[in-house]
Image: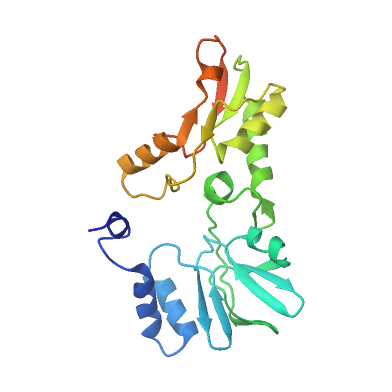
Amino acid sequence: MPAFQRDVGYGINQTELVAMLIAEEETFVEGIQNVFERIKGSCSMMILIEDGIIAARDKLGRTPVILGRKKDAWAASSESIAFPNLGYEVDHEIGPGEIVHITAEGVQQLAPPGEKMQICAFLWVYYGYPASVYENINVESCRYRCGAALARKDDTEVDFVSGIPDSGLAHALGYSHERKLPYFRAFVKYTPTWPRSFMPQDQSQRDFIARMKLIPNREMIEGNGWFFVMILSFEAPS
């Protein structure tokens, strides 16, 4: 069995499973709400229909669905960074469990948002794209502030600061600037051919991917007697 099938549950096609649950009900709204009630976990979705797109954010709002707008057009994405180069401006994020119908003329609410929000904090800490904005909070600036907050509580004697790419970089820059320490790239990342290391279900695969794509710059690490702080992202081997 291919590895990608093992990773998603021994050959279960998640898209087909969601489609089957939607088809059990009479309407798209009822079908999507059926998915929200019966699947444990996050399942935001966009469905292309004859006259537009139906977009739905998962029941507790764990993953965003963001609406973009420009003259005579609307768009939906899980990332705000999808919009600027296409000429869209972020209009708003739909709420937890909210369902909307999007056409070129506008957005119609089909189901209102719920009252409870449990958005995933890892969007800002780890797997969100640096230029993205979730709930009006920019990812890069959030990571920078986290690094600065860490520096204010740390008095370790070090010579320079280094971040593990990619998500550890902004944390390290915040730490470096707050403590007025030099920042050096002691590790670089080789991205071609290697996926995000947190995605495989097996820990040994995660370790292998992280080890293969993180390359130490030994000239900066070995034989110089320096002490340095590494701000780790979750790309680092466990």
* Quarter in which the C terminus is drawn: top left
Give how far across and how far down residue 210 sits, in percent: 42, 38
Give how far across and how far down residue 146 sits, in percent: 63, 37
* Quarter in which the N terminus is drawn: bottom left
Give how far across and how far down residue 90 sits, in percent: 71, 65
Report the residue that reaches farthest toward the front: 192
Report the residue that reaches farthest toward the left: 1
Q: Is residue 103 above or below residue 121?
A: below
Q: Residue at x 67, y 27 (%)?
A: 176
Image-based side of 171 in relation to 29, left or right: right
For the residue pair 175 and 189, the one nearer the viewer reads as 189
User: Residue 148 lies in what quarter of the image?
Assistant: top right
For the residue pair 93 and 81, the one nearer the viewer reads as 81
Q: Residue at x 38, y 71 (%)?
A: 15
Asked whether residue 30 is in view, the answer is yes
Image-based side of 88 in relation to 119, left or right: right
User: Residue 224 lies in what quarter of the image?
Assistant: top right
Image-based side of 178 in relation to 185, left or right: right
Give how far across and how far down residue 99 sits, in percent: 56, 77
Q: Is residue 118 above or below residue 18?
A: above
Asked whether residue 154 is in view, the answer is no
Image-based side of 197 in relation to 181, left or right: left
For the residue pair 223 and 153, the one nearer the viewer reads as 223
Color theme of the render: rainbow
